[in-house]
Image (cartoon, rainbow, N blue to C red):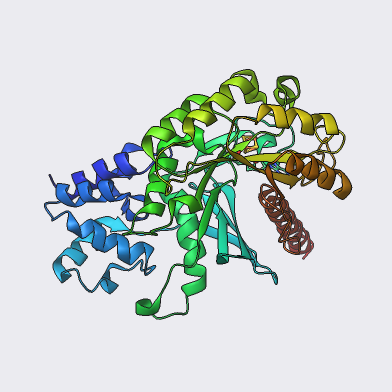
Amino acid sequence: MSTEAVAVSAVSEAQQHTPSAPAQQKAVEKVNLLGMSRPQMEKFFEDMGEKKFRAGQVMKWIHQFFVTDFAEMTNISGKLREKLEKICEIKAPEVVHKNYSKDGTRKWVFRVGDGEGSLVETVLIPAEDKTGSRKTLCISSQVGCALDCSFCSTGKQGFQRDLSQAEIIGQLWMANYSYMEDVPVAERERSVTNVVMMGMGEPLLNYDAVLNSMRIMLDDFAYGMSKRRVTLSTSGVVPKIDQLAQDIDVALAISLHAPNDELRNELVPINKKYPLEQLIAACQRYITKDGNESARKHVTIEYVMLDGVNDKPEHAQQMIKLLKNLPSKINLIPFNPFPHAPYGRSSRNRIISFQKTLSDAGFVCTIRQTRGDDIDAACGQLVGQVADRTRRAEQWKKKIAQSNEIMRSQG
Ligand code: SAH
Ligand code: SF4
Protein backbone atom coordinates (compact mmCIF):
# COMPACT_ATOMS: atom_id res chain seq x y z
CA MET A 1 0.00 0.00 0.00
CA SER A 2 1.29 3.51 -0.73
CA THR A 3 1.93 5.79 2.23
CA GLU A 4 -0.95 7.96 1.09
CA ALA A 5 -3.31 5.00 1.04
CA VAL A 6 -2.10 4.05 4.51
CA ALA A 7 -2.80 7.56 5.66
CA VAL A 8 -6.32 7.48 4.28
CA SER A 9 -7.21 4.06 5.72
CA ALA A 10 -5.80 4.93 9.13
CA VAL A 11 -7.71 8.20 9.11
CA SER A 12 -10.99 6.43 8.53
CA GLU A 13 -10.38 3.80 11.19
CA ALA A 14 -8.78 5.69 14.00
CA GLN A 15 -10.18 9.16 13.66
CA GLN A 16 -13.59 10.62 13.21
CA HIS A 17 -13.47 13.55 10.88
CA THR A 18 -16.31 15.89 10.19
CA PRO A 19 -18.54 13.88 7.88
CA SER A 20 -18.86 16.86 5.53
CA ALA A 21 -15.08 17.07 4.88
CA PRO A 22 -14.53 16.58 1.14
CA ALA A 23 -12.89 13.29 0.11
CA GLN A 24 -9.89 14.91 -1.61
CA GLN A 25 -9.07 16.89 1.48
CA LYS A 26 -8.82 13.64 3.48
CA ALA A 27 -6.13 12.29 1.15
CA VAL A 28 -3.71 15.08 2.04
CA GLU A 29 -4.68 15.33 5.70
CA LYS A 30 -2.05 13.97 8.04
CA VAL A 31 -2.91 11.10 10.36
CA ASN A 32 -3.11 12.25 13.95
CA LEU A 33 -1.36 9.61 16.09
CA LEU A 34 -2.49 11.21 19.36
CA GLY A 35 -5.79 9.34 19.56
CA MET A 36 -4.68 5.88 18.48
CA SER A 37 -4.91 2.98 20.91
CA ARG A 38 -2.05 0.47 20.84
CA PRO A 39 -3.79 -2.10 18.58
CA GLN A 40 -4.75 0.71 16.20
CA MET A 41 -1.21 2.09 16.09
CA GLU A 42 0.30 -1.39 15.70
CA LYS A 43 -1.91 -1.96 12.68
CA PHE A 44 -0.92 1.44 11.34
CA PHE A 45 2.80 0.56 11.52
CA GLU A 46 2.26 -2.92 10.07
CA ASP A 47 0.31 -1.45 7.16
CA MET A 48 3.30 0.79 6.57
CA GLY A 49 5.60 -2.24 6.41
CA GLU A 50 7.16 -1.44 9.78
CA LYS A 51 7.47 -3.56 12.94
CA LYS A 52 4.53 -3.27 15.26
CA PHE A 53 6.68 -2.65 18.38
CA ARG A 54 7.22 0.84 16.97
CA ALA A 55 3.70 1.60 18.23
CA GLY A 56 4.74 1.19 21.87
CA GLN A 57 7.82 3.35 21.32
CA VAL A 58 5.89 6.16 19.68
CA MET A 59 3.10 5.99 22.26
CA LYS A 60 5.63 6.43 25.07
CA TRP A 61 7.04 9.54 23.39
CA ILE A 62 3.57 10.98 22.95
CA HIS A 63 1.87 10.11 26.23
CA GLN A 64 4.77 9.86 28.70
CA PHE A 65 7.19 12.48 27.40
CA PHE A 66 4.66 14.79 25.69
CA VAL A 67 6.74 15.03 22.52
CA THR A 68 4.95 16.18 19.36
CA ASP A 69 7.98 16.47 17.08
CA PHE A 70 9.14 13.20 15.48
CA ALA A 71 12.69 14.57 15.33
CA GLU A 72 12.88 14.23 19.13
CA MET A 73 12.06 10.50 19.08
CA THR A 74 15.67 9.41 19.41
CA ASN A 75 15.17 5.62 19.50
CA ILE A 76 13.55 5.67 16.07
CA SER A 77 15.68 5.62 12.92
CA GLY A 78 16.07 8.85 10.99
CA LYS A 79 14.49 7.27 7.94
CA LEU A 80 11.33 6.25 9.76
CA ARG A 81 11.12 9.61 11.51
CA GLU A 82 11.21 11.35 8.14
CA LYS A 83 8.51 9.06 6.82
CA LEU A 84 6.32 9.71 9.86
CA GLU A 85 6.79 13.45 9.57
CA LYS A 86 5.46 13.34 6.00
CA ILE A 87 2.22 11.51 6.74
CA CYS A 88 1.54 11.91 10.46
CA GLU A 89 1.12 14.53 13.13
CA ILE A 90 0.61 14.59 16.90
CA LYS A 91 -1.98 17.24 17.50
CA ALA A 92 -4.01 18.10 20.59
CA PRO A 93 -7.16 20.21 20.14
CA GLU A 94 -6.62 23.98 20.15
CA VAL A 95 -6.80 25.66 23.57
CA VAL A 96 -8.89 28.84 23.29
CA HIS A 97 -9.03 29.60 26.98
CA LYS A 98 -7.18 28.38 30.05
CA ASN A 99 -7.37 29.36 33.64
CA TYR A 100 -5.27 28.16 36.57
CA SER A 101 -6.79 28.92 39.94
CA LYS A 102 -5.02 29.64 43.23
CA ASP A 103 -6.58 26.52 44.74
CA GLY A 104 -4.82 24.40 42.08
CA THR A 105 -7.90 23.90 39.87
CA ARG A 106 -7.11 24.20 36.17
CA LYS A 107 -9.62 24.66 33.36
CA TRP A 108 -9.29 24.57 29.62
CA VAL A 109 -11.70 25.36 26.83
CA PHE A 110 -10.81 23.61 23.58
CA ARG A 111 -11.98 24.41 20.10
CA VAL A 112 -12.78 21.26 18.16
CA GLY A 113 -13.68 20.88 14.50
CA ASP A 114 -12.99 23.05 11.49
CA GLY A 115 -13.55 26.78 11.09
CA GLU A 116 -15.19 28.34 14.10
CA GLY A 117 -15.69 24.86 15.46
CA SER A 118 -17.32 24.15 18.81
CA LEU A 119 -16.12 24.56 22.36
CA VAL A 120 -15.64 21.84 24.97
CA GLU A 121 -14.24 22.10 28.45
CA THR A 122 -11.92 20.12 30.70
CA VAL A 123 -11.43 20.68 34.42
CA LEU A 124 -8.62 19.47 36.68
CA ILE A 125 -9.25 19.32 40.42
CA PRO A 126 -6.41 18.58 42.86
CA ALA A 127 -7.08 17.01 46.27
CA GLU A 128 -5.19 15.57 49.21
CA ASP A 129 -6.43 12.36 50.81
CA LYS A 130 -5.06 9.44 52.79
CA THR A 131 -3.62 7.87 49.63
CA GLY A 132 -1.57 11.01 48.89
CA SER A 133 -2.24 13.83 46.50
CA ARG A 134 -4.61 13.33 43.61
CA LYS A 135 -5.15 15.27 40.43
CA THR A 136 -8.54 14.40 38.96
CA LEU A 137 -9.34 15.39 35.39
CA CYS A 138 -12.95 15.76 34.29
CA ILE A 139 -13.05 14.96 30.56
CA SER A 140 -15.73 15.74 27.95
CA SER A 141 -16.90 13.12 25.46
CA GLN A 142 -19.31 15.05 23.21
CA VAL A 143 -20.08 18.60 22.15
CA GLY A 144 -23.42 19.17 23.88
CA CYS A 145 -25.66 16.26 24.82
CA ALA A 146 -28.86 14.80 23.40
CA LEU A 147 -30.26 13.58 26.69
CA ASP A 148 -31.54 16.91 27.98
CA CYS A 149 -31.50 16.40 31.74
CA SER A 150 -33.49 19.30 33.16
CA PHE A 151 -30.77 20.54 35.57
CA CYS A 152 -27.81 20.35 33.15
CA SER A 153 -26.44 23.25 31.13
CA THR A 154 -24.77 20.90 28.61
CA GLY A 155 -28.17 19.28 28.00
CA LYS A 156 -29.63 22.72 27.28
CA GLN A 157 -27.15 23.16 24.38
CA GLY A 158 -28.55 20.09 22.59
CA PHE A 159 -26.29 17.58 20.83
CA GLN A 160 -23.76 18.91 18.35
CA ARG A 161 -21.30 16.10 17.73
CA ASP A 162 -19.19 13.30 19.15
CA LEU A 163 -15.57 13.99 20.04
CA SER A 164 -12.93 11.90 18.25
CA GLN A 165 -10.42 9.76 20.13
CA ALA A 166 -7.73 12.41 19.57
CA GLU A 167 -10.03 15.08 20.99
CA ILE A 168 -10.86 12.98 24.06
CA ILE A 169 -7.32 11.79 24.87
CA GLY A 170 -6.01 15.23 23.84
CA GLN A 171 -7.67 16.66 26.96
CA LEU A 172 -5.64 14.30 29.18
CA TRP A 173 -2.50 14.91 27.14
CA MET A 174 -2.87 18.69 27.50
CA ALA A 175 -3.54 18.56 31.25
CA ASN A 176 -0.41 16.46 31.83
CA TYR A 177 1.65 18.61 29.46
CA SER A 178 0.59 21.78 31.29
CA TYR A 179 2.74 20.68 34.25
CA MET A 180 5.72 19.66 32.10
CA GLU A 181 6.01 22.39 29.45
CA ASP A 182 9.21 23.79 30.98
CA VAL A 183 10.71 20.47 32.07
CA PRO A 184 13.40 18.83 29.88
CA VAL A 185 11.93 15.93 27.88
CA ALA A 186 13.90 13.21 29.69
CA GLU A 187 12.60 14.35 33.09
CA ARG A 188 8.92 14.61 32.20
CA GLU A 189 6.31 12.75 34.25
CA ARG A 190 2.59 12.11 34.15
CA SER A 191 0.79 14.29 36.70
CA VAL A 192 -2.91 13.44 36.34
CA THR A 193 -3.75 10.54 38.68
CA ASN A 194 -7.51 10.15 38.12
CA VAL A 195 -9.90 10.60 35.23
CA VAL A 196 -13.66 11.00 35.44
CA MET A 197 -15.70 10.98 32.23
CA MET A 198 -18.00 13.61 33.74
CA GLY A 199 -17.49 16.58 31.47
CA MET A 200 -19.81 17.50 28.62
CA GLY A 201 -21.75 14.73 26.92
CA GLU A 202 -22.94 11.20 27.56
CA PRO A 203 -19.87 8.95 27.19
CA LEU A 204 -21.85 5.78 26.49
CA LEU A 205 -23.41 7.44 23.43
CA ASN A 206 -19.93 7.95 21.96
CA TYR A 207 -19.02 4.43 22.86
CA ASP A 208 -16.13 3.36 20.62
CA ALA A 209 -14.14 6.58 20.93
CA VAL A 210 -14.61 6.64 24.72
CA LEU A 211 -13.71 2.95 25.07
CA ASN A 212 -10.51 3.30 23.02
CA SER A 213 -9.58 6.47 24.89
CA MET A 214 -9.97 4.69 28.22
CA ARG A 215 -7.79 1.87 26.85
CA ILE A 216 -5.08 4.44 26.17
CA MET A 217 -5.49 5.74 29.74
CA LEU A 218 -4.92 2.24 31.16
CA ASP A 219 -2.14 1.23 28.74
CA ASP A 220 1.33 0.98 30.32
CA PHE A 221 2.81 2.33 27.08
CA ALA A 222 0.66 5.45 27.52
CA TYR A 223 -0.74 6.79 30.81
CA GLY A 224 -0.63 3.50 32.76
CA MET A 225 -3.45 4.64 35.04
CA SER A 226 -4.99 2.37 37.64
CA LYS A 227 -8.37 1.04 36.48
CA ARG A 228 -9.92 2.12 39.77
CA ARG A 229 -8.87 5.67 38.99
CA VAL A 230 -10.69 5.85 35.66
CA THR A 231 -14.43 6.41 36.10
CA LEU A 232 -17.12 6.53 33.46
CA SER A 233 -20.26 8.42 34.44
CA THR A 234 -23.56 7.70 32.71
CA SER A 235 -27.13 8.82 33.06
CA GLY A 236 -28.14 5.21 32.41
CA VAL A 237 -27.80 3.89 28.85
CA VAL A 238 -28.54 0.34 30.03
CA PRO A 239 -27.45 -1.82 27.03
CA LYS A 240 -24.15 0.06 26.86
CA ILE A 241 -23.47 -0.57 30.56
CA ASP A 242 -23.60 -4.31 29.77
CA GLN A 243 -21.33 -3.84 26.78
CA LEU A 244 -18.86 -1.86 28.88
CA ALA A 245 -18.69 -4.73 31.38
CA GLN A 246 -17.60 -7.02 28.51
CA ASP A 247 -15.04 -4.61 27.10
CA ILE A 248 -13.08 -3.01 29.96
CA ASP A 249 -12.61 -2.92 33.72
CA VAL A 250 -13.12 0.67 34.88
CA ALA A 251 -15.12 2.27 37.67
CA LEU A 252 -18.74 3.16 36.94
CA ALA A 253 -20.73 6.12 38.22
CA ILE A 254 -24.48 6.45 37.72
CA SER A 255 -26.20 9.81 37.56
CA LEU A 256 -29.24 8.78 39.57
CA HIS A 257 -30.62 12.10 40.84
CA ALA A 258 -34.05 10.69 41.73
CA PRO A 259 -35.14 7.62 43.70
CA ASN A 260 -38.45 6.96 41.88
CA ASP A 261 -39.44 6.72 38.21
CA GLU A 262 -41.92 9.57 38.27
CA LEU A 263 -39.36 12.13 39.40
CA ARG A 264 -36.50 10.61 37.41
CA ASN A 265 -38.56 10.75 34.19
CA GLU A 266 -38.74 14.49 34.74
CA LEU A 267 -35.09 15.10 35.72
CA VAL A 268 -33.30 12.49 33.58
CA PRO A 269 -35.56 11.82 30.57
CA ILE A 270 -33.62 8.73 29.42
CA ASN A 271 -35.30 7.07 32.42
CA LYS A 272 -38.46 6.77 30.28
CA LYS A 273 -36.53 4.39 28.04
CA TYR A 274 -34.56 2.59 30.76
CA PRO A 275 -36.46 2.88 34.05
CA LEU A 276 -34.92 2.42 37.48
CA GLU A 277 -35.55 -1.31 37.77
CA GLN A 278 -33.58 -1.94 34.55
CA LEU A 279 -30.86 0.51 35.54
CA ILE A 280 -30.29 -0.99 38.98
CA ALA A 281 -30.26 -4.51 37.48
CA ALA A 282 -27.60 -3.39 34.95
CA CYS A 283 -25.50 -1.98 37.81
CA GLN A 284 -25.80 -5.28 39.65
CA ARG A 285 -24.59 -7.11 36.54
CA TYR A 286 -21.69 -4.67 36.25
CA ILE A 287 -20.44 -5.53 39.72
CA THR A 288 -17.97 -8.36 39.47
CA LYS A 289 -17.59 -11.05 42.05
CA ASP A 290 -14.04 -11.98 41.14
CA GLY A 291 -10.80 -10.41 42.20
CA ASN A 292 -10.07 -7.74 44.76
CA GLU A 293 -8.19 -5.77 42.17
CA SER A 294 -11.24 -5.07 40.04
CA ALA A 295 -12.59 -1.56 39.60
CA ARG A 296 -16.06 -3.06 39.62
CA LYS A 297 -16.64 -3.89 43.27
CA HIS A 298 -19.17 -1.10 43.70
CA VAL A 299 -20.77 1.67 41.66
CA THR A 300 -20.79 5.34 42.56
CA ILE A 301 -24.22 6.93 42.73
CA GLU A 302 -24.29 10.63 41.82
CA TYR A 303 -27.19 12.64 43.20
CA VAL A 304 -27.51 16.35 42.46
CA MET A 305 -29.24 18.18 45.32
CA LEU A 306 -32.10 20.32 43.97
CA ASP A 307 -33.87 22.52 46.46
CA GLY A 308 -37.34 21.20 47.31
CA VAL A 309 -37.29 18.76 44.37
CA ASN A 310 -35.35 15.60 45.30
CA ASP A 311 -33.87 16.48 48.71
CA LYS A 312 -36.68 15.62 51.15
CA PRO A 313 -36.51 12.95 53.88
CA GLU A 314 -38.91 10.74 51.90
CA HIS A 315 -36.45 10.77 48.98
CA ALA A 316 -33.64 9.62 51.26
CA GLN A 317 -35.87 6.77 52.48
CA GLN A 318 -36.65 5.75 48.89
CA MET A 319 -32.91 5.77 48.11
CA ILE A 320 -32.26 3.36 50.97
CA LYS A 321 -34.82 0.90 49.56
CA LEU A 322 -33.71 1.30 45.97
CA LEU A 323 -30.02 0.72 46.66
CA LYS A 324 -30.26 -1.90 49.37
CA ASN A 325 -28.96 -4.74 47.19
CA LEU A 326 -26.42 -2.75 45.22
CA PRO A 327 -22.85 -2.31 46.51
CA SER A 328 -22.60 1.45 46.10
CA LYS A 329 -21.08 4.68 47.34
CA ILE A 330 -23.24 7.76 47.17
CA ASN A 331 -21.95 11.19 46.20
CA LEU A 332 -24.27 14.14 46.84
CA ILE A 333 -23.58 17.01 44.44
CA PRO A 334 -24.69 20.52 45.42
CA PHE A 335 -26.53 21.84 42.33
CA ASN A 336 -24.54 24.36 40.29
CA PRO A 337 -26.93 27.06 39.15
CA PHE A 338 -26.63 28.52 35.62
CA PRO A 339 -28.59 31.32 33.90
CA HIS A 340 -32.29 30.42 33.51
CA ALA A 341 -31.87 27.17 35.46
CA PRO A 342 -35.25 26.09 36.76
CA TYR A 343 -33.80 24.92 40.11
CA GLY A 344 -31.95 26.17 43.16
CA ARG A 345 -29.26 24.49 45.26
CA SER A 346 -30.45 22.65 48.39
CA SER A 347 -29.41 24.32 51.64
CA ARG A 348 -26.31 23.05 53.42
CA ASN A 349 -28.51 21.75 56.28
CA ARG A 350 -30.75 19.85 53.87
CA ILE A 351 -27.76 18.21 52.22
CA ILE A 352 -26.20 17.27 55.57
CA SER A 353 -29.41 15.74 56.92
CA PHE A 354 -29.90 13.80 53.64
CA GLN A 355 -26.36 12.49 54.03
CA LYS A 356 -26.99 11.55 57.68
CA THR A 357 -30.08 9.51 56.82
CA LEU A 358 -28.11 7.53 54.24
CA SER A 359 -25.02 7.12 56.46
CA ASP A 360 -27.18 5.94 59.37
CA ALA A 361 -28.62 3.30 57.05
CA GLY A 362 -25.09 2.01 56.43
CA PHE A 363 -24.22 3.70 53.11
CA VAL A 364 -20.94 5.43 52.42
CA CYS A 365 -22.23 8.87 51.48
CA THR A 366 -20.07 11.91 50.72
CA ILE A 367 -20.82 15.49 49.70
CA ARG A 368 -18.95 16.80 46.68
CA GLN A 369 -16.83 19.87 47.34
CA THR A 370 -17.53 22.67 44.91
CA ARG A 371 -14.18 23.92 43.67
CA GLY A 372 -12.61 26.38 41.26
CA ASP A 373 -15.20 29.07 41.94
CA ASP A 374 -12.59 31.82 41.42
CA ILE A 375 -12.22 30.81 37.78
CA ASP A 376 -15.80 30.61 36.61
CA ALA A 377 -18.37 28.01 37.40
CA ALA A 378 -17.96 24.26 37.68
CA CYS A 379 -18.54 21.48 35.10
CA GLY A 380 -20.66 22.31 32.07
CA GLN A 381 -20.82 26.04 32.51
CA LEU A 382 -17.41 27.38 31.57
CA VAL A 383 -18.06 26.95 27.86
CA GLY A 384 -21.19 29.09 28.11
CA GLN A 385 -19.23 31.87 29.78
CA VAL A 386 -16.35 31.73 27.30
CA ALA A 387 -18.80 31.69 24.39
CA ASP A 388 -20.49 34.75 25.90
CA ARG A 389 -17.18 36.52 26.30
CA THR A 390 -16.13 35.63 22.73
CA ARG A 391 -19.46 36.94 21.48
CA ARG A 392 -19.03 40.15 23.48
CA ALA A 393 -15.48 40.55 22.15
CA GLU A 394 -16.76 40.06 18.60
CA GLN A 395 -19.51 42.62 19.14
CA TRP A 396 -16.88 45.07 20.37
CA LYS A 397 -14.70 44.44 17.33
CA LYS A 398 -17.70 45.02 15.05
CA LYS A 399 -18.57 48.26 16.85
CA ILE A 400 -15.00 49.55 16.58
CA ALA A 401 -14.83 48.60 12.90
CA GLN A 402 -18.14 50.39 12.31
CA SER A 403 -17.02 53.58 14.05
CA ASN A 404 -13.69 53.51 12.14
CA GLU A 405 -15.70 53.15 8.95
CA ILE A 406 -17.90 56.15 9.89
CA MET A 407 -14.81 58.26 10.74
CA ARG A 408 -13.19 57.28 7.44
CA SER A 409 -16.32 58.09 5.42
CA GLN A 410 -16.54 61.45 7.21
CA GLY A 411 -12.97 62.14 6.10
N1 SAH B 1 -23.58 12.44 30.83
C1 SAH B 1 -22.93 11.83 31.93
C2 SAH B 1 -21.62 12.49 32.29
C3 SAH B 1 -21.57 13.98 32.24
S1 SAH B 1 -22.53 14.84 33.43
C4 SAH B 1 -23.83 11.77 33.12
O1 SAH B 1 -24.90 12.38 33.10
O2 SAH B 1 -23.48 11.07 34.05
C5 SAH B 1 -21.49 14.67 34.87
C6 SAH B 1 -22.23 14.87 36.19
O3 SAH B 1 -22.52 16.25 36.41
C7 SAH B 1 -23.55 14.12 36.23
O4 SAH B 1 -23.74 13.45 37.44
C8 SAH B 1 -24.50 15.25 36.07
O5 SAH B 1 -25.75 14.90 36.50
C9 SAH B 1 -23.86 16.37 36.86
N2 SAH B 1 -24.41 17.69 36.59
C10 SAH B 1 -24.89 18.17 35.43
N3 SAH B 1 -25.34 19.43 35.58
C11 SAH B 1 -25.13 19.78 36.86
C12 SAH B 1 -25.36 20.97 37.62
N4 SAH B 1 -25.91 22.05 37.08
N5 SAH B 1 -25.01 20.96 38.92
C13 SAH B 1 -24.41 19.87 39.47
N6 SAH B 1 -24.18 18.72 38.80
C14 SAH B 1 -24.52 18.67 37.51
FE1 SF4 C 1 -26.20 14.79 29.17
FE2 SF4 C 1 -25.16 14.03 31.52
FE3 SF4 C 1 -26.04 16.55 31.13
FE4 SF4 C 1 -27.80 14.56 31.29
S1 SF4 C 1 -26.41 15.25 32.92
S2 SF4 C 1 -27.82 16.23 29.78
S3 SF4 C 1 -26.69 12.91 30.28
S4 SF4 C 1 -24.35 15.59 30.10
Q: In front here: 384 or 369?
A: 369
Relative side of 33 to 3, left or right: right
Percent position (x, y) of residue 331?
A: 68, 45
Residue at the location (28% across, 67% down)? 70
**Nearer to us in this view, 3 or 378:** 378
> Quarter of the image holding residue 294?
top left
- Spot occupied by residue 253 in the image (x, y as percentages of width and height): 57, 40
Q: Residue at x 44, y 58 (%)?
A: 92
Whether 166 is drawn above or below 303: the answer is below
Which quadrant would residue 273 be assigned to in this image?
A: top right
Dividing the image into 4 quarters, which one contains the C terminus? Answer: bottom right
Assign the N terminus to one quadrant of the image.
top left
Expressed as whole percent of the image width and height from the top left, the position of residue 400 reads 75, 61
Left or right relative to 370: residue 62:
left
Total labels: the figure holds 0
Q: Is residue 17 visible?
A: no
The residue under the point 70% across, 72% down is 102
Q: Looking at this view, is 399 or 123 the one in front?
A: 123
Q: Nearer the viewer, residue 214 or 110?
A: 214
- Looking at the image, residue 176 lies above or below residue 122: below
| Drawn side of residue 83 relative to residue 250, left or right | left
Can residue 108 be seen at all in this image of the molecule? yes
Q: Is residue 9 left or right of residue 185?
A: left
Q: Position of residue 278 (x, y in %)?
A: 57, 21
Quarter, ligand 2: top right
